[in-house]
Image: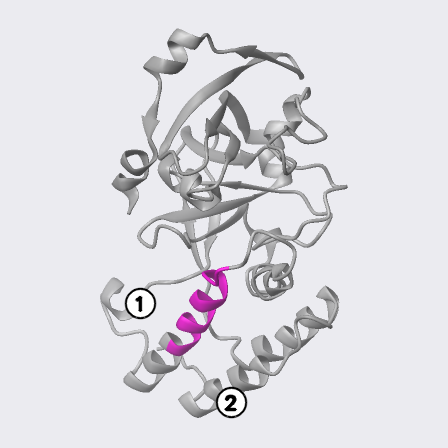
Amino acid sequence: MRTLPSVRTVLDCIERWRSVDLLTLTDEEVEHELSGLITTLADREVVRLRTGGPRTFYRVRNVEQDQQGNRGVGWPWTKLQDLLWPPTCVDKRGRCNRPGESVLYVCPASGTALAEMLDVGANNDFVAIKYLCTEPLSLAKVVGPYDPNAMCEQEVLNPDGLAAYQIVREFIRTEFTRHVDRGDSLSFLYKASSAIARCWFSPGKQDGWIYPSVQCSEEDCIAVTVEKARSSFQVVSAVRWASPSNSGIMFPLERAVIMGEELSWRVVPQEQRRRSIRSIRAYLSPVR
């Protein structure tokens, strides 16, 4: 039977973590602080999932626009790698990556991918990408099962150990499902989740991480290491969509034409646009 620290010890560790100043500390300093907590709670077992293969995944990337709604610098994307992972010069941090690190964020469900990125009611211009992963993925499940005992033939945690485990589980779940503004003002909050991914669930031991979607609580998101993305992910299709402000609809503008490592974009004819208009609410409802 596994043993965990007492509930009091777990709560004391989490309370000390809550005093960490994520705004001013560097990523290295945040990871150092987290390492101390992990040392105390080291008996928490990492659950790993292995996906079947091949299978499809989805991602939505926003196309930057200026205040007049014009497409921003960098469009059109002309390289296949623009659909696979952001370049290392991108300085935005995410739930599992530091600034300058490439991680491929995907979802098993297309509606989840859209919900994670779509700013409902705003003027949106985005690219929906469909991938084929040709090999199985070994993923660290960031939020483990609620009751490990229910998954085993014999009890693996006594009542006190189960209570401590569930407190730690809720702590991790809270950090990974924290709503972070899409702008830069609150992006520093990602320091916590990226530190947990790097320290608690070492990327060297798996192909990525699976964690709950913020926008679709019953669905999952996946972050894949760039090495695995390069070796096992292929782009099946990519379509640039528009969703005018407060329209409640989305329609296709351009489809990607893939030629080796190069991309070009073919305009969707007006008649096809009209036939392809979709309700955003209907598109999202199956995963909510």
Above or below, 141 relative to 42:
above
Label 1 with label 2: CB-CB less than 8 Å: no
Q: Measuring from the top left, give residue 174's x and y in whole percent.
A: 44, 68
For residue 78, side relative to residue 167 (left or right): right
> In which quarter of the view is residue 160 placed?
bottom left
Residue tagged by mark 1? 146
Q: Of marks 1 and 2, which one's residue comes earlier in the chain?
A: 2
> In which quarter of the view is residue 188 placed?
bottom right
Could you tell me the amino acid type at mark 2? Asp
Residue tagged by mark 2? 12
In magenta, the rendered stretch is: 167-179
Tell me if residue 168 is in the magenta stretch. Answer: yes
Residue 131 makes an appearance in the image: no
Q: Residue at coordinates 67% horizontally, 31% vertically from top-left? A: 72
Q: Measuring from the top left, give residue 133's x and y in whole percent.
A: 48, 30
Q: Residue lying farthest bottom?
A: 8
Tell me if residue 14 is in the magenta stretch. Answer: no
Q: Residues within 10 Å of mark 2 (few under 14, many from 20)?
A: few
